[in-house]
């Protein structure tokens, strides 16, 4: 932050290159001289959109901005909020629609509010919650689907649980769904993800019949039909678990992470992640008990949808008065731990992660004012051996075409499928493989024909290749 005037905070946005070099930073004040807090960011191929809260003597306002990829401010819009104190809620959030419009959600007085701006900052519509559940609401989370419709989840203020609603692309309420615990209590804010086919997955912490809490996860169709609802409370019927969030991979598998009461008598809680298939059946439960303290707290969750195999990343900390250990874990779709790393700052202190993002095998985590880029270990592989059987033949071209256009084949090493080594896995690669096999075209670039690492830098990864040591 930058003082403006001295003693007050402005918005700060930074962009880093893949190798961690700071490309630019932008400091921009909200309206009035007060405390400004940036709360969420969304990135498209052409721009960066942010939302935050600005406080001044005249009241609070919601500030939404868009920058180009060089950090140039394209537009800024303010929306005055009521001065009534918000109910139990999350900070404002933002999402980008397929038409490049921006939707923001926030708590405004005693209801949640959605606002949509077009690509150049013009307000298209705004709507406070006015559904059939006559209750105060506190904003939790939102998501925008492939049609531009908005799904939002919120707290119902009278102890009536949570509500999930869907608005169409022009802001009309289509449906709403109420979720109740045994006694109506909610211990944790709901989180929301948009899955394949625009299905809506919501997780919240609801009260059980034991008076404790559980992970409550449900999936709703785009038309509002409840497709499944499951709870996870822990190893015994009256255990208690507190969810942090959920994530959905490209295959529709759902992952939920949080903190759960430990089954032993030594600790208070563990990091607990649960995996479900696309139909809501529990696939696995994994608990991590960090050795240095009694209490573990989950901090972030995310998936890499560019990885056809699926899987999930989670982070958490151990707490004993102060944070004493921080960890990032990758789980395979079957729940096996594919890798983990302790997170520390440059001064040697644990990094408390507040958010993470994963794409093409790279994981970026942020927290405690320090951004860290972590890279998955890349295996040795043979270029053009797309099916990983150790031989270069027509089966590799078939595997590549299947992965690209049908989806029944699972590619664990996209680097191996990049036959022409242009840094992309696309139709040109099986064409290059067939040309080499049947027309005498030049062989693929290294590593070929023997195993080896990729000598070129690109976004493709190879977390696993069974035919190479």
Image (cartoon, rainbow, N blue to C red):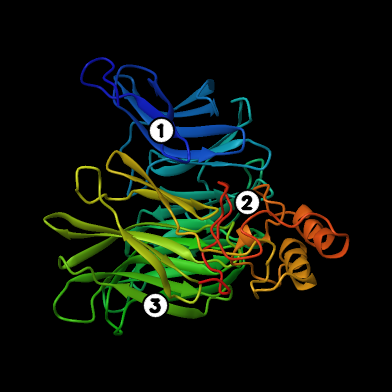
Residues tagged 1 and 3 counted as in contact (Cβ below 8 A): no
In the image, residue 343 above or below residue 5: below
The kind of secondary structure element at disc 3 is strand
- Earlier in the chain: of badge 2 and badge 1, it is 1
State the image coordinates of residue 50 (x, y, percent, origin top left): 47, 33
Q: Compute the Cα span from label 2 to label 1.
A: 22 Å
State the image coordinates of residue 320 (x, y, percent, origin top left): 13, 60
| For residue 118, side relative to residue 27 (left or right) | right
State the image coordinates of residue 73 (x, y, percent, origin top left): 52, 21
Residues tagged 2 and 1 counted as in contact (Cβ below 8 A): no
The kind of secondary structure element at disc 2 is loop
Q: Find disc 1 in the rendering and name its residue.
A: 52
What number of labels is visible? 3
Q: Nearer the viewer, residue 255 or 416?
A: 416
Q: Find disc 3 in the rendering and name its residue.
A: 285
| For residue 71, side relative to residue 180 (left or right) | right
Q: Find disc 2 in the rendering and name its residue.
A: 145
**Location of residue 257 (image quadrant):** bottom left
| Res. 136 visible in picture | no
Q: Tell me which residue sits at (63%, 42%) in the image.
A: 97
Q: Tell me which residue sits at (39%, 66%) in the image.
A: 339
| Res. 103 visible in picture | yes
- Earlier in the chain: of badge 1 and badge 3, it is 1
| For residue 324, side relative to residue 218 (left or right) | left
Q: Compute the Cα span from label 3 to label 2.
A: 29 Å
């Amino acid at each position: 932050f930058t003082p403006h005037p001295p003693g007050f905070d402005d918005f700060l946005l930074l962009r880093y290159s893949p190798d961690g070099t700071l490309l630019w930073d932008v400091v921009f004040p909200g309206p009035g001289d007060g405390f400004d807090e940036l709360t969420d960011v969304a990135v498209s191929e052409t721009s960066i959109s942010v939302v935050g809260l600005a406080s001044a003597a005249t009241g609070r306002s919601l500030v939404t901005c868009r920058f180009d990829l060089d950090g140039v401010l394209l537009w800024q819009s303010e929306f005055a909020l009521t001065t009534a104190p918000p109910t139990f809620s999350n900070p404002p959030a933002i999402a980008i629609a397929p038409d490049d419009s921006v939707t923001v959600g926030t708590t405004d007085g005693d209801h949640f509010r959605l606002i949509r701006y077009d690509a150049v900052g013009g307000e298209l519509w705004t709507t406070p919650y006015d559904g059939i559940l006559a209750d105060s609401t506190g904003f939790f989370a939102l998501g925008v689907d492939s049609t531009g419709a908005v799904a939002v989840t919120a707290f119902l203020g009278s102890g009536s649980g949570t509500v999930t609603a869907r608005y169409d692309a022009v802001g009309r309420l289509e449906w709403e769904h109420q979720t109740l615990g045994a006694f109506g209590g909610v211990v944790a804010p709901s989180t929301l993800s948009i899955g394949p086919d625009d299905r809506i997955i919501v997780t919240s912490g609801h009260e059980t019949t034991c008076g404790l809490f559980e992970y409550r996860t449900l999936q709703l169709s785009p038309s509002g039909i409840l497709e499944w609802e499951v709870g996870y409370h822990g190893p015994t019927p009256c255990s208690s678990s507190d969810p942090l969030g959920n994530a959905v991979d490209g295959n529709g598998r759902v992952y939920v992470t949080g903190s759960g009461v430990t089954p032993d008598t030594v600790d208070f809680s563990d990091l607990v992640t649960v995996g479900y298939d696309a139909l809501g059946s529990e696939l696995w439960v994994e608990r991590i008990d960090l050795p240095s303290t009694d209490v573990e707290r989950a901090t972030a969750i995310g998936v890499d949808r560019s990885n056809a195999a699926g899987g999930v990343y989670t982070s958490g900390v151990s707490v004993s008065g102060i944070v004493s250990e921080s960890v990032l874990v990758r789980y395979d779709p079957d729940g096996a731990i594919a890798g983990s790393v302790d997170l520390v700052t440059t001064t040697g202190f644990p990094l408390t992660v507040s958010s993470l993002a994963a794409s093409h095998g790279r994981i970026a985590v942020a927290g405690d004012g320090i951004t860290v880029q972590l890279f998955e270990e890349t295996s040795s592989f043979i270029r053009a051996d797309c099916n990983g059987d150790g031989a270069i033949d027509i089966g590799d071209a078939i595997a590549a075409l299947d992965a690209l256009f049908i989806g029944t084949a699972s590619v664990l090493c996209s680097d191996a499928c990049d036959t022409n080594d242009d840094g992309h896995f696309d139709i040109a690669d099986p064409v290059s493989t067939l040309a080499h096999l049947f027309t005498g075209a030049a062989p693929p670039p290294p590593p070929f024909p023997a195993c080896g690492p990729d000598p070129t830098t690109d976004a493709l990864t190879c977390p696993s290749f069974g035919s190479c040591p």
